[in-house]
Image (spheres, rainbow, N blue to C red):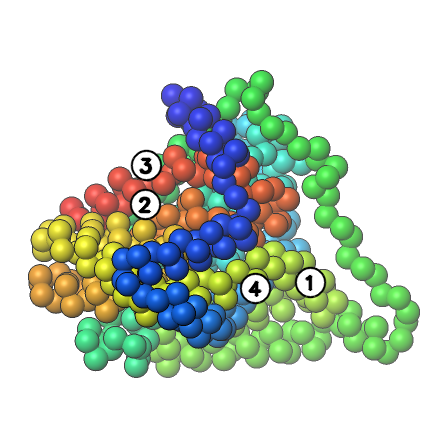
């Protein structure tokens, strides 16, 4: 049944979805027009907002790029690759392959979104070498695990409000992860998606006559570059001693940090994955080889994130984001505010595809509404977080890393992901409003 429903969606996306770079340019123009038409801003004012905001997310952009790169380096260590290879050997049929990629991606994305994207893509390629299965759906299954990230350990909004001195601390105080990530309603949503997402992927499998396969030879990884000479500098590149000293020292620091009741932040997550990657890769040569490959997947982030910062600046400075959020929040009651916050966040995410950036845009609107209606600010914050994650299923920005690794285009997987948008929206809405 679901494979019949997904077919027209796949054809629609294949025909009309533009390249992610063109997508962000189109969004820029649409937001500018909306700011002039709805908020009565002059063209010059809009251009100034855009230009002034273009570079405002450089620090956050670097954090996001490091999440991807450190996640890639972690996922590409020999230990993790051997584990993925052994897991892939357990996939004896196309249906089992789809389920396994879905579960691995979901669990990995809950731990860390960059790790999840990379592990999902690498595992999909590993399985495609061993099992004849529709490669588009296999990669879409890997990306569908990303749906869960903002309810997980690297969720930028719950980690932000758990940090002392965060932007809205004077309004809501510091809210620990026990009230957000590890709350009952959030864990219930996570568990529900762990069940629903793999089953939906399995049920979307197209018939063999409509499947798209890939030649396993095209998926082979390049062999690591060997030392060019036996010089002292080359021997140092292959030495494990220096890497172990630095990596173990970093892990010791983190152990002490958590003993001192340190909180889990994006910087801590990046530091953890980098130190583990240093230890598991063993030598500087292996680590740098992995780094050079990981950076390639982040090319889209580097060029597109400034454009989204410019879009965000227009949305915030013109009042357009507040207008959208206000319009939806005005419909809310104490019981329905989480739902409308979720929907508004899903809409805003098309224009501000950054959890941290979206929090900056919507928190000034949602938090006062939550206080006025007596809604738990932790639930309101997680409503925005889940809305941000939800529409990533059809917002191609965060698919760039996995597409770069898998060698596909956004239009190849977005048709399958559109069905996830519909079904997961129902699941998440129920969890936010009724649990």
Indicate the position of residue 337 as horizontal and vertical percent values.
Answer: 16, 54
Classed neighbour count for the residue bearing mark 4: other residues with Cα under 10 Å, few (<14), some (14–19), many (≥20): some
Verify CB contact (< 8 Å) between mark 1 and mark 2. no
Residue indicated by mark 2: 191
Q: Which residue is rendered at x = 50% and y = 58% of the image?
A: 114
Query: Going by the image, does 359 lie left or right of 92?
Result: left
Which circle, 4 or 2, is nearer the viewer?
4
Indicate the position of residue 319 as horizontal and vertical percent values.
Answer: 27, 66
Residue indicated by mark 1: 292
Q: Which residue is rendered at x = 49% and y = 45% of the image?
A: 143
Which circle, 3 or 2, is nearer the viewer?
3
Quarter of the image that includes the N terminus: top left
Tell me the number on the disc at residue 423.
3
Classed neighbour count for the residue bearing mark 3: other residues with Cα under 10 Å, few (<14), some (14–19), many (≥20): some
Residue indicated by mark 4: 302
The answer for how far apart the CA atoms under marks 1 and 2 are is 35 Å
């Amino acid at each position: 049944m679901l494979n019949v429903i997904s077919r027209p969606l796949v054809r629609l996306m294949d025909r009309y979805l533009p390249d992610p770079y063109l997508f962000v340019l189109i969004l820029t123009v649409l937001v500018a027009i909306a700011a002039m038409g709805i908020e009565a801003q002059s063209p010059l004012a809009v251009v100034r907002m855009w230009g002034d905001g273009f570079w405002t997310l450089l620090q956050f952009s670097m954090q996001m790029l490091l999440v991807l790169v450190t996640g890639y380096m972690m996922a590409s260590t020999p230990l993790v690759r051997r584990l993925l290879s052994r897991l892939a050997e357990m996939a004896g049929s196309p249906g089992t392959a789809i389920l396994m990629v879905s579960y691995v991606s979901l669990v990995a994305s809950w731990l860390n979104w960059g790790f999840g994207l990379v592990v999902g893509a690498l595992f999909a390629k590993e399985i495609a070498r061993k099992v004849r299965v529709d490669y588009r759906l296999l990669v879409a299954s890997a990306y569908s695990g990303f749906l869960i990230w903002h309810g997980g350990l690297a969720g930028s909004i719950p980690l932000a409000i758990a940090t002392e001195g965060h932007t809205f601390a004077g309004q809501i105080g510091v809210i620990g992860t026990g009230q957000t990530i590890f709350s009952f309603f959030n864990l219930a949503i996570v568990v529900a998606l762990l069940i629903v997402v793999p089953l939906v992927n399995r049920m979307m499998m197209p018939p063999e006559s409509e499947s798209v396969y890939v030649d396993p030879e095209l998926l082979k990884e390049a062999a690591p570059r060997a030392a060019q000479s036996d010089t002292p500098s080359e021997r140092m590149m292959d030495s494990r001693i220096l890497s172990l000293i630095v990596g173990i020292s970093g892990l010791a620091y983190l152990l002490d940090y958590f003993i001192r009741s340190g909180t889990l932040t994006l910087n801590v997550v990046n530091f953890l994955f980098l130190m583990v990657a240093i230890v598991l890769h063993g030598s500087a040569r292996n680590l740098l080889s992995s780094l050079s490959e990981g950076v390639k997947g982040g090319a889209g982030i580097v060029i597109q994130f400034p454009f989204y910062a410019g879009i965000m600046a227009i949305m915030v400075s013109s009042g357009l984001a507040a207008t959208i959020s206000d319009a939806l929040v005005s419909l809310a009651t104490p019981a329905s505010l989480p739902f409308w916050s979720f929907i508004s966040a899903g809409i805003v995410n098309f224009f501000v595809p950054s959890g941290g950036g979206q929090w900056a845009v919507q928190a000034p609107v949602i938090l006062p509404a939550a206080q006025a209606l007596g809604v738990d600010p932790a639930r309101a914050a997680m409503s925005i977080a889940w809305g941000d994650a939800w529409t990533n299923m059809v917002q191609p920005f965060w698919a760039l890393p996995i597409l770069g690794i898998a060698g596909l285009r956004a239009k190849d997987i977005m048709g399958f992901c559109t069905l996830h948008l519909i079904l997961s929206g129902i699941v998440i809405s129920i969890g936010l409003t009724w649990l």
